[in-house]
Amino acid sequence: MMSPITIVLFAFVTMLFACQEPTKTSEQVPSSIAKIDTLPAVFGDTLPIDRSSGYLTGHFMPDTSSLFTNVDISYADREGMYLRKDTYRAFQKMATAAARDSVKLVIRSATRNFDYQKGIWERKWNGETKLSGNISADTIPDKKQRALAILRYSSMPGTSRHHWGTDIDLNAFNNAYFDEGEGLRVYQWLLRHAADYGFCQPYTEKGPHRPSGYEEEKWHWSYLPVSHILLTEASKRLNNSMISGFKGSETAGDIDVVQNYILGVDSSCIHPGQLSN
Ligand SMILES: [Zn+2]
C-alpha cells in the first residue's frame, strides 16, 4: 500500500510531466550542443552553440543546420550566404539603424565552412588567385614563408572565424575604401555604433595590443555574444595538429596558427576574463 504522502508526490510528479510543452522538432539541435552562457541580456536571445572541435574548424553544412538562416539579398551583394540566426537578427537591427543614418551595410561574405575556405586557400597556394600586391604564392619556395604570405589576409582552413557563423565582411575588401568618402562614413558609423548591437572588429591595426595575426581588416565584424564563447572554446580545444587536410597544412605547427592567428584578435572581441587560463 502506498502512503498518502507517496500518492500526493506521485500525483504531483505526473502533473509536472503533463504540463511540459511538447518538444519542438524544427529547432531541435543535437544533444552534444550545450546551452550557452551569454553576455548580459542586452543583446537578446542567443541560440544554443556547438562547442565541438568539428564545428570550430568548420566541418559542417550551414545550409542544413537549424541554427543558421539564409541572408536575404536586401542585406547582401549575392544570394546563398548563411549566418547563425542570432547573429543575423543582430545584424538586421544594426543595418536598420545604419540605414536611418543613411549608411548602407552590405554583407559581402558570411559563413564559410572548411571546404569553402580550403578552396580559397588552395587557389592562393597554387598561385591561381594572386595575393595583394599581385604576388603569386607559388613563386615562394619556402613553404612556411608561402603560408605566411597567404596568412596576411586569408585564414588556413579550420582556423577561420567565418566557420563560426558569427562573422561577416562588410561593403568592401580593402582598407582604402574605408579611408575616405562613403567608406569612411560607414567605418565611422560602425566604430560608433556596432558595439551597441554586439559587433566588434577582431582585426584592428596591429600593434602593442594586437601583436600577432592578420593585417587590419576594417570590413570584418564579429557577433561578440556568441563569438567570444567560440574563441574561448577554440583556445581550449584546438591545437595545431588538428589544422590539417589542405595543401601547406604541415606549416601550421611551425607558425603556431592557433596562438598567433585564431587568438590574435583585438581585445574588444575577447570577453573580459574569458582567455585568462
Ligand atoms: Zn572576414
Image (tube, rainbow, N blue to C red):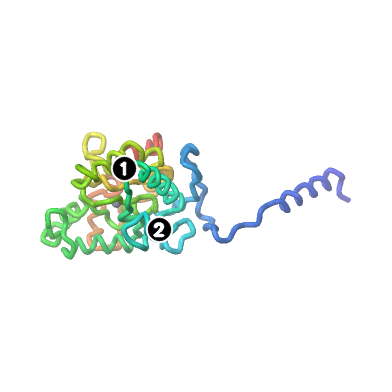
Q: Is residue 48 left or right of residue 140?
A: right
Q: Is residue 247 visible?
A: yes
Residue at (30% x, 58% y) in the render:
157
Identify residue for label 1: 201
Tell me the SS state at disc 2: loop
Residue 43 place in picture, x, y as percent: 46, 41
Residue at (42% x, 44% y) in the render:
229
Please tell me the numbered disc located at residue 251.
none
Q: Is residue 224 left or right of residue 124?
A: right
Residue 104 place in picture, x, y as percent: 32, 48
Extreme residue toward the right, this view = 1
Q: Nearer the viewer, residue 10 or 268?
A: 268
Image quadrant in which you'd find residue 122: bottom left
Identify residue for label 2: 72
Q: Quadrant of the C terminus?
A: top left
Q: Is residue 127 left or right of residue 41?
A: left
Q: How many numbered circles are shown?
A: 2
Mark 2 or mark 1: which comes first in sequence?
Answer: 2
- Crowding near pointer 1: few (<14 within 10 Å), some, many (20+)? many
Q: Is residue 57 visible?
A: no
Image quadrant in which you'd find residue 195: top left
Amino acid type shown at disc 2: Asp
Residue at (49% x, 47% y) in the render:
46
Residue 180 place in picture, x, y as percent: 19, 42
- Crowding near pointer 2: few (<14 within 10 Å), some, many (20+)? some
Amino acid type shown at disc 1: Gln
Q: Nearer the viewer, residue 31 or 197?
A: 197
192 vs 127: above or below: above
User: What separation in Å lies between label 2 and label 1 (alpha carbons)?
Assistant: 23 Å
